Amino acid sequence: MARFDPEKMAVYRLARQHNRAVHALITTADTRGFADLVAQLRRSCTSIPANVLEAAGEWRSGKRLHYLMIAKGSTWESWAHTDSMVDFGLVPPKTIAEVRGLQGEITALLITTIRRLEAELSARKCPKNHVAAVPVNDAGPSKSKSNSNSKSKSKSKVNSRAS
């Protein structure tokens, strides 16, 4: 029986590496007075690998897509919080290079995976060779035209007789 190993997933490995890089960034920064920012950054960072694994364990494509979208959003949120650390002067811009590089790689992998999954879902909903069903009554398409024409002809005959 095959065993699931999350470490074989590139995006999961990168997300964990990102967590370690963010932790190193936070521990070297003077974050006094910015506990809320640090907490938000930690939460958004830990959300990335958690949602990647939730997606991997989900057998329904729609739910898998949902978790991947959350992971992408958390990646972008951690990107913004990292920028805020620079903006507030907690770290110099150079020190976020590793974190920023990982955020870019994670984002690229997630977007690629999301687009592939969306295409897969779209293909399932509307196959290429799918022909839209044309509503047909019991008499068939050709007879229904003649029936409707004959009904209107007979109505006009009845109208002409009445006059």
Image (cartoon, grey):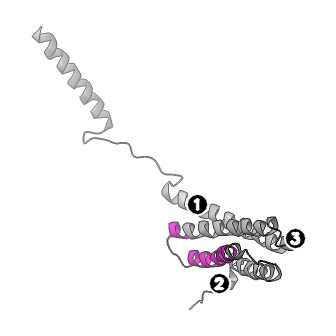
- Indicate the position of residue 70 as horizontal and vertical percent values: 60, 68
Region of the chain picked out in magenta, as a range: 39-64
The C terminus lies in quadrant: top left
* Residue pointed to by mark 3: 92
What residue lies at 32% left-to-right and 34% top-to-bottom?
142
Q: Earlier in the sequence, mark 1 or mark 2?
A: 2
Magenta highlight: main SS: helix
- Residue matched to label 2: 6
Query: In this picture, is 83 found above or below 140?
Result: below
- Mark 1 belongs to which amino acid? Glu
Point out residue 95 in the picture as x, y percentages from the top left corner.
86, 74
Q: CA distance from mark 1 to mark 2?
A: 22 Å
Location of residue 75 in the rendering, given as x and y in whole percent from the top left corner: 69, 69
Residue ID at (83%, 74%) = 98
Is residue 15 or residue 125 the one in the foreground?
15
Pick whichever, 76 or 126, lies toward us: 76
Residue that appears at 60% across and 65% down: 69
Residue type highlighted by circle 3? Pro
Q: Secondary structure at mark 2?
A: helix
Q: Nearer the viewer, residue 13 or 137?
A: 13
